[in-house]
Amino acid sequence: MRLIDYLDKGAMLGAQAPCMRMGDKDLSYAQVQSLSHRVARVLQGFGIRPGAKVAVLSGNDPVPFSCVFGISRAAAVWCPINPRNEAAENRFVLDAFDCEGLLFHSAYAPLVAQIRPELPKLRALVCLDQALPFAPSLDQCLAGVDEAPLDVPAIDDLAMIAGTGGTTGSPKGVMLSGRNLESMSALTLMGYPFEGRPAYLALAPLTHAAGVLCLPVMALGGCVVIMPRPDLGEFLHLIEQHRITHTFLPPTLIYMLLQHPQLEHTRLDSLQCFWYGAAPIAAARLEEALHKIGPVMAQLFGQTEAPMMVSMMAPKEHFNADGSVARRRLASAGRPGPLVQVGIMDADGRLLPTGESGEIVVRGSLVMMGYYKDPKATEEASRHGWHHTGDIGLLDADGFLYIVDRAKDMIISGGFNIYSVEVEQALLAHPDVQDSAVVGLPDEKWGERVVAVLQLHAGRSCEAEAIQSFVKARLGSVKAPKQIEIWPELPRSKVGKVLKKDIRAMLLAAQLR
């Protein structure tokens, strides 16, 4: 299936049914279909041919997301651009991915004006919401365009090129095929509850996880309710107003949601599946969510190169057969999906037995085609015939996957391997701690010492010594942080992930002062 096929499948189930909603914008499947045909013709008019790369730069909104299906209809390749990126990073991405078209919202006009002189490959520049001196508006481009159905055959199966984020250097372009996204959608529909027409609430950026999760929802003729900006109060209001059945939040936002005063007053009985992922979640917070939100929490683990569904934990798997919370299992990332092979590999390419830790490797139709124009990085990531995730983990006797750390985040202190995620989990069990980051710093005695940086819940205070004792009681003195810092906020990436690299750099700089 191509991207456009999910929209067309939903339209077959009810052309007048709501497809996308945001505020007073309400687009039916028929309206999104019509817009996709017209956008495809506009792109053809600019000289966009099958296989050409077209980027979308916008916040969450139904119109730019509808344009994604126009890109697919024209047999072009969608390149989602993160609106939170700096100008230099977006210029790099647009150039490195050979983008010939850019559809953007006027909020990003200054950024586009700054970088477009350095992008000679761009032949189509369209502002989504208003005309600009250097770009026509989408409405101007659509005026008089034929609404007749358009079906341009694809030249290959490449559906989208997604950037890796660039936290370890320049972003790499992950080539995802229609087959990759079809596998992800099939796994989603196989592994999680879907009853009736789903209503999916997208708070997270549609350029990331929230976007591809729309595809299985559309395949069932469901409605995507789009939030233009993060607002947890509005998030709760929309769940109740639209009888939301499915949604997704990263753990950091779930922690904030659990403290939100409106949560206990919101009707949540429509929820079938509340996905969490993109970072490890604290088992103690997850158990709290099961009580406060309900037995609907559902884990997913993946990465851009193997989108979303490497391993999965459906709502029912959070509980034992007798209905009690499966506490040990809450620390896992679920079980490998039925269409995915997952192994644990050592540095020599040997697959390790049950219970042993090593790098998590994956293979199957979920895994990317490769990195765009980067055969060396593709070869490195796919050595020994498996995709290498960069995560360290183990599989237990019941087939549950446990992620113990990112390979680059492991700390070696006094000759012991210490996994930062394990220490972070212990810290997050403390009632005053909202979020934590654990890094290793050079130490004359230990080689590296364990350092924890904490963000406390609003209005809470706690002594570092008390938290150190709390962790020591759970993990022992070797793994307990030797140094604890309490900061008002932890630095985060554009998608909300805690930036350990930046934290470590700030701690080292402070040490030198």
Image: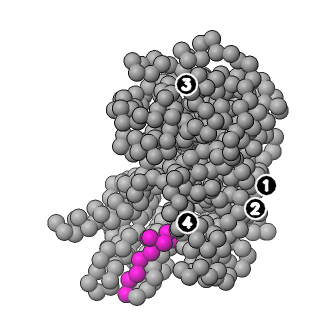
Disc marking residue 339: 2
Q: Quadrant of residue 478?
A: bottom left
Q: Nearer the viewer, residue 75 or 431?
A: 75
Of the numbered discs 4 and 2, the one sitting upstream in the chain is 2
Tell me the CA gap for discs 1 and 2: 10 Å
Query: Where residue 308 sits in the image (x, y, percent)?
Result: 63, 55
> Residue 433: percent from the left, percent from the top?
43, 62
Determine which residue is flagged by label 3: 46
| Labels 1 & 4 near each other (Cβ < 8 A) | no
Which one is earlier in the sequence, the residue at label 1 or at label 4? 1
Q: Nearer the viewer, mark 4 or mark 2?
A: 4
Work out whether mark 2 precedes mark 3 in sequence or the reverse, and give the earlier one.
Answer: 3
Q: Nearer the viewer, mark 1 or mark 2?
A: 2
Q: Which stretch did the figure color magenta? A: 401-414
Q: Secondary structure at mark 3?
A: loop
> Considering depth in this image, is 147 or 400 the residue closer to the camera?
147
Task: Give yes or no for contact between labels 1 and 2 (Cβ–Cβ under 8 Å).
Answer: yes
Using the image, determine if residue 129 lies above or below residue 473.
above
Q: Are marks 1 and 3 in contact (CB under 8 Å)?
A: no
The reply to whether the C-beta atoms of the residues labelled 4 and 2 are less than 8 Å apart is: no
* Residue in view at x 77 percent, y 63 percent: 338
In the rendered structure, which disc, 1 or 3, sits on the residue that comes first in sequence? 3
Q: Mark 2 or mark 1, which is nearer the start of the sequence?
A: 1
Q: Check the picture and name the quadrant holding the C terminus.
A: bottom left
Circle number at residue 250:
none
Which label belongs to residue 190? 1
Kind of element beneath mark 4: helix
Q: Nearer the viewer, mark 2 or mark 3?
A: 3
Name the quadrant containing residue 305: bottom right
Placement of 449 over or under 304, stated as above or below: below
Q: Amino acid at mark 1?
A: Met
- Secondary element at tag 2: loop
